[in-house]
Image: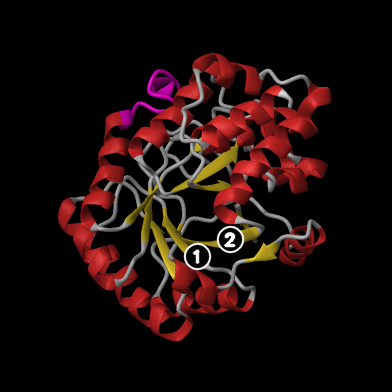
């Protein structure tokens, strides 16, 4: 038995990955990548079988953000050419949900730029969610920025299943990415979502000049947060942002990162998110041996892969798309 399978077996016996093992996963020799991904798949298969969860983003409010996040084309310091608009109306949110349902998407993600939502924006989302749930039965994930307790309670009451607020990077690296809010602000919002009864979703962006120690810390921090869903984004550096031109990633390293997150968070939904097309490139299918969830369609201000290509990628692997009905039976 190879070392990766030995680690996987210990993980399946509820043992934690050691720091030395975590470093070894990120430093896995390239010619052992298939052995590593097979070991990650044994963990993934134990908890999720061959099912793949599909997610789709509705960019409900774009630009106009006062924050200074260095990766983001919507921030106050970005010079990127993007569309800017205020919160879309109910009909637009419903139209997006209808499209998601038609593509067999299980989780519809309503995302809005900004530091945090105004109460009227919370009401707009809440009003749409009730009808989306009634018509399509989709799981709803909201990502609206920093929340207040009463806003979290309102979203939960309206039927929002999950709230996303990414930690993005490690606490040590946070000030290199943004200074307009703290790492603690982000953690507090995730905890607030949990307290309200919504499922917590929090993830990372890999490739923002972080160290391997930072990557391991991120995975462990999300384990400590007990995030049910962990989006793993890979930096798609956008022209006009402070991180323009940063290109640190290689497809094989991206696979090692996905494997690490599966080893450290074995029971959680690991979601391959933004930047997979430009960073994993032709190795995208291999990512699903560690991850059990992907976004399809476009992201916030960058284009994704054609949806039908994603469907074919999943079925060509012998995997199965988890239906909306299955999600409603077995949970988010």
Looking at the image, is mark 1 or mark 2 earlier in the sequence? 2
**Magenta segment, prevailing SS (helix, strand or loop):** loop
The residue at 69%/65% (across/down) is 320
Instruction: Give left or right: position of 278 versus 222.
Output: right
| Tags 1 and 2 touching, CB below 8 Å | yes
Q: Secondary structure at mark 2?
A: strand
Instruction: Give left or right: position of 10 versus 315.
Output: left
Looking at the picture, how far across and down is residue 27, in whole percent? 68, 18
Instruction: Give left or right: position of 187 versus 235.
Output: left
The residue at 55%/41% (across/down) is 232
- Quarter of the figure with residue 321: bottom right
Q: Which residues are magenta?
A: 169-183
According to the picture, the residue beneath numbered tag 2 turns out to be 53
In what quadrant of the picture does the C terminus appear?
Answer: bottom left
Work out whether 312 lies above or below 130: above
Q: Residues within 10 Å of mark 1 (few under 14, many from 20)?
A: many
Asked whether residue 72 is in view, the answer is: yes
- Determine if the magenta segment contains residue 143: no
Looking at the picture, how far across and down is residue 308, in whole percent? 76, 67
According to the picture, the residue beneath numbered tag 1 turns out to be 107
- Determine if the magenta segment contains residue 170: yes
Looking at the picture, how far across and down is residue 278, in whole percent? 73, 41
């Amino acid at each position: 038995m190879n070392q990766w399978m030995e680690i996987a077996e210990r993980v399946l016996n509820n043992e934690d990955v050691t720091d030395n093992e975590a470093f070894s996963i990120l430093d896995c020799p390239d010619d052992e990548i298939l052995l590593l991904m097979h070991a990650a798949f044994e963990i993934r298969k134990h908890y999720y079988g061959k099912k793949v969860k599909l997610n789709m983003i509705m960019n409900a409010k774009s630009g106009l953000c006062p924050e200074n996040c260095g990766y983001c084309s919507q921030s106050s310091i970005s010079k990127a050419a993007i569309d800017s608009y205020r919160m879309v109306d109910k009909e637009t949110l419903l139209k997006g949900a209808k499209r998601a349902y038609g593509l067999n998407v299980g989780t519809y993600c309503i995302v809005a730029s900004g530091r945090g939502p105004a109460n009227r924006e919370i009401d707009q989302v809440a009003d749409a969610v009730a009808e989306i749930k009634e018509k399509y039965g989709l799981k709803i994930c909201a990502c609206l920025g920093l929340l207040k307790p009463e806003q979290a309670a309102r979203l939960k009451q309206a039927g929002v299943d999950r709230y996303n607020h990414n930690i993005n990077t490690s606490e040590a690296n946070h000030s290199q990415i943004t200074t307009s809010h703290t790492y603690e602000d982000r953690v507090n919002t995730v905890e607030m979502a949990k307290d309200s009864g919504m499922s917590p979703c929090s993830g990372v962006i890999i490739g923002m000049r972080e160290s391997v120690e930072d990557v391991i810390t991120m995975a462990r921090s999300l384990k400590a947060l007990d995030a049910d869903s962990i989006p793993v984004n890979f930096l798609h550096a956008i022209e006009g942002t402070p991180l323009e031109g940063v290109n640190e990633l290689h497809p094989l390293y991206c696979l090692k990162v996905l494997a690490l997150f599966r080893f450290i968070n074995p029971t959680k939904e690991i979601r391959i998110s933004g930047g997979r097309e430009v960073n994993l490139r032709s190795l995208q299918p291999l990512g699903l041996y560690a991850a059990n969830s992907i976004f399809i369609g476009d992201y916030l201000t960058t284009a994704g892969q054609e949806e039908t290509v994603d469907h074919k990628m999943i079925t060509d692997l012998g995997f199965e798309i988890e239906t909306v009905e299955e999600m409603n039976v077995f949970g988010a």
